Image: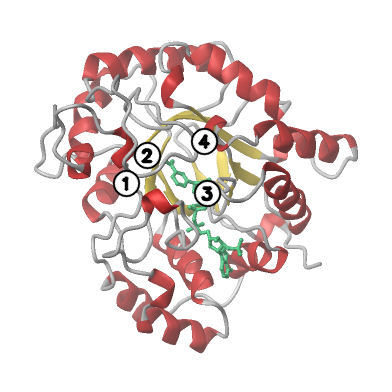
């Protein structure tokens, strides 16, 4: 097994001064990988040198991951303070964030979290494994008032010392413009979908300007994403001829080019893999053989505004279609 010295992995500095590795391991099994398989990947990734893990209650595996962390601490393999562990409050727990956070901490067997995100800015719940047509009749559109009630509970978690940082996910510029001035504790990071065919340049620059770290999900274009997130018009990032050519020049899989590009661009990808060879390479690749400026420029040109996680299952009664979730006309869709 290859081991990467964690001190060679680039680090991001959050506004608190805390460090976060510039690559984390995703832990969403995309509705097909079982919890014990994901736990085995986390066990292997820890040994390979990963120190950052992107968890969430709705991934349904935090209890299994908690066993892995506890074993690693007990074996003296790693210390708690060497890890950066994130979790997220799921949409059905926005009105009791403290209970959600305590449950994740209990499952993960941790006495604090490094980051806790609001997973989606809607309290709209969908059942695990549901299909794209699934709608919850109780779903509602975003409102600033409702979101801030949730965010104030997030802020209390920081006050209580349960979490070191709080963050948001699946946000848009109009939503951020409305809520950031109301935050007593600003988000330290925002998780958003980011891969070569979906670069979100405006939101990206907005977060950079505000000093918010950018964590990119689906960094490889999530080839095994759930069926509800697959549409015929979607483009495969790793299938693009430009990505294949760059990969060939570096003697790696195009997935690895996605990770190098993300880290060199300045955000933090959280790739998922069950395979030792792949997750090891996804970390190792940011410590060696960087992309050239020309290659970075070629990938910049691959943006196709191809959002993969469209979020149809979060739509409310009266919404038109998934575009309503993303405020594409610059105003919050109600
Ligand atoms: N905040 C949110 O709403 C949100 C939404 C979606 C995802 N996320 C987070 O983001 C993480 C990553 O997203 P994702 O899991 O959807 O997709 P992803 O990381 O873009 O893609 C994962 C897929 O890529 C393959 N892969 C990984 N490394 C590879 C390599 N070096 N060579 C070839 N194939 C490789 C994996 O297959 P193998 O297992 O075969 O290697 C897996 O099928 C999630 O796990 C989750 O933690 C957050």
Q: Is residue 326 left or right of residue 309?
A: left
Q: Earlier in the sequence, mark 4 or mark 2?
A: 4
Badge 1: few (under 14), some or many (20 or more) residues near its Cα, within 10 Å? some
Q: Which residue is mark 2?
A: 212
Q: Earlier in the sequence, mark 3 or mark 1?
A: 3
> 150 or 39: nearer the eye?
39
Q: Which residue is mark 4?
A: 17
Above or below for 56 versus 180: below
CB at disc 3 and ligand 1 closer than 8 Å: yes
Query: What's the distance in space between the residues labelled 2 and 1, CA to CA?
Result: 6 Å
| Residue at the (46%, 55%) spot, across then down | 225
Query: What's the distance in space between the residues labelled 2 and 3, CA to CA?
Result: 27 Å
Query: Which tag is nearer the camera, tag 4 or tag 2?
Result: 2
The part of the image, by quadrant, that contains residue 95 is top left
**The C terminus lies in quadrant:** top left
Query: Which tag is nearer the camera, tag 2 or tag 3?
Result: 3
Q: Earlier in the sequence, mark 3 or mark 4?
A: 4
The part of the image, by quadrant, that contains residue 320 is top left
Query: Which tag is nearer the camera, tag 3 or tag 4?
Result: 3
Count of labels in the image: 4
| Residue at the (79%, 54%) spot, across then down | 47
Query: Which tag is nearer the camera, tag 3 or tag 1?
Result: 3
Q: Residue furthest right?
A: 75
Q: Position of residue 58 (x, y in %)?
A: 53, 32
What SS does tag 1 mark? helix
Q: Position of residue 85 (x, y in %)?
A: 62, 36
What is the number of the mark on residue 30? 3
What SS does tag 2 mark? loop
Q: Which residue is mark 1?
A: 208
Query: What's the distance in space between the residues labelled 4 and 2, CA to CA?
Result: 12 Å
Q: Earlier in the sequence, mark 4 or mark 1?
A: 4
| Residue at the (35%, 81%) spot, across then down | 294
């Amino acid at each position: 097994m290859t081991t990467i010295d964690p001190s060679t992995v680039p680090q991001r500095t959050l506004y608190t001064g805390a460090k976060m590795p510039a690559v984390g391991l995703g832990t969403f099994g995309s509705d097909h990988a079982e919890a014990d398989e994901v736990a085995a990947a986390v066990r292997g990734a820890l040994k390979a040198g990963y120190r950052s893990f992107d968890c969430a209650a709705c991934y349904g595996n935090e209890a299994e991951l908690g066993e892995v962390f506890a074993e690693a601490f007990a074996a003296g393999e790693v210390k708690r303070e060497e890890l950066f562990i994130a979790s997220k409050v799921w949409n059905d727990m926005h009105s009791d964030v403290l209970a959600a956070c305590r449950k994740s901490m209990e499952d993960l067997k941790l006495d604090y979290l490094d980051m806790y995100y609001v997973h989606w800015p809607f309290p709209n719940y969908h059942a695990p494994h549901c299909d794209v047509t699934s709608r919850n009749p109780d779903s509602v559109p975003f409102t600033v008032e409702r979101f801030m009630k949730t965010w104030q509970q997030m802020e209390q978690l920081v006050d209580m010392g349960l979490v070191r940082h709080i963050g948001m996910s699946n946000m848009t510029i109009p939503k951020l413009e409305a809520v950031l001035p109301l935050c007593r504790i600003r988000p330290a990071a925002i998780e958003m979908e980011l891969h070569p065919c979906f670069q979100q340049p405006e939101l990206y620059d907005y977060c950079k300007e505000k000093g918010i770290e950018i964590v990119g999900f689906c960094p490889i274009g999530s080839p095994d994403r759930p069926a509800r997130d697959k549409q015929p018009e979607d483009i495969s990032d790793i299938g693009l001829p430009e990505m294949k050519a760059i990969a060939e020049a570096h003697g790696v899989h195009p997935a690895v080019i996605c990770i190098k590009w993300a880290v060199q661009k300045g955000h933090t990808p959280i790739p998922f893999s069950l395979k030792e060879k792949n997750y090891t390479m996804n970390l190792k690749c940011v410590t060696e053989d960087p992309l050239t400026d020309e290659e970075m420029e070629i990938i910049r040109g691959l943006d196709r505004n191809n959002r993969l996680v469209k979020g149809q299952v979060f739509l409310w009664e009266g919404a038109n279609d998934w575009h309503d979730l993303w405020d594409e006309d610059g105003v919050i869709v109600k």
